[in-house]
Image (tube, rainbow, N blue to C red):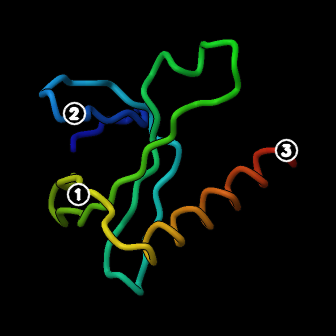
Amino acid sequence: MEHGETNTITVVDEQGNEQLCEILFTFESDEFGKSYVLYYPIGEDDQEDEDIDIHASSFIPNQETGDGELSPIETEEEWDLVEEMLNTFLAEQEEE
C-alpha cells in the first residue's frame, strides 16, 4: 500500500488491476495489534445513488515509511470493530 499526501492508495484487486482509492479514514486497534484503513474506489462517489462501495483492510504500518501491506480482514471480531468505527464515523459526518 502506498499513499501520498492526498489520502489516496493504490489497491490491486484479484485480477491484478490497479485501482486508485480514496482513504475514508484509518484507525488503530490495540486489541488486534493492527491498523485498519477504510477506502472506496475513486469515481464511485460521482454516481447518483448514495451507495458507495466502502472497502476495509488491515495493515501493519512500516515504522520507517508509514506504508503497510494491506491484508484482508478475516475474523468476525475485526469486522465488528470496523463496522462500529465506520458507523461512528458516518454519524459524525452527518452531524457536521
- Describe residue 73's horizontal placement relative to residue 68 as left or right: right
Location of residue 51 by image quarter: top right
- Label 3 SS: loop
Q: What number is the disc on residue 96?
A: 3
With respect to residue 1, does 59 lie above or below? below
Q: Position of residue 14 (x, y in %)?
A: 17, 35
- Check the picture and name the quadrant holding the C terminus: top right
Of the numbered discs 1 and 2, the one sitting upstream in the chain is: 2
- Label 1 SS: strand
Task: Return the residue nearer the eye: 71 or 5.
Answer: 71
Which residue does the numbered mark 2 point to in the structure image? Answer: 13
Name the kind of residue labelled 3 in the image. Glu
Q: Position of residue 75 (x, y in %)?
A: 36, 73
With respect to residue 29, does 87 lie above or below? above
Q: CA distance from mark 1 to mark 2?
A: 12 Å
- Label 2 SS: loop
Task: Return the residue nearer the eye: 70 or 4.
Answer: 70
Location of residue 31 by image quarter: bottom left
Name the kind of residue labelled 1 in the image. Ser
Location of residue 92 by image quarter: bottom right
With respect to residue 96, does 45 lie above or below? above
Task: Return the residue nearer the eye: 51 or 27.
Answer: 51
Mark 1 or mark 3, which is nearer to you? 1
Which residue does the numbered mark 1 point to in the structure image? Answer: 71
With respect to residue 71, does 29 lie above or below? below
Of the numbered discs 1 and 3, the one sitting upstream in the chain is: 1
- Describe residue 31's horizontal placement relative to residue 85 as left or right: left
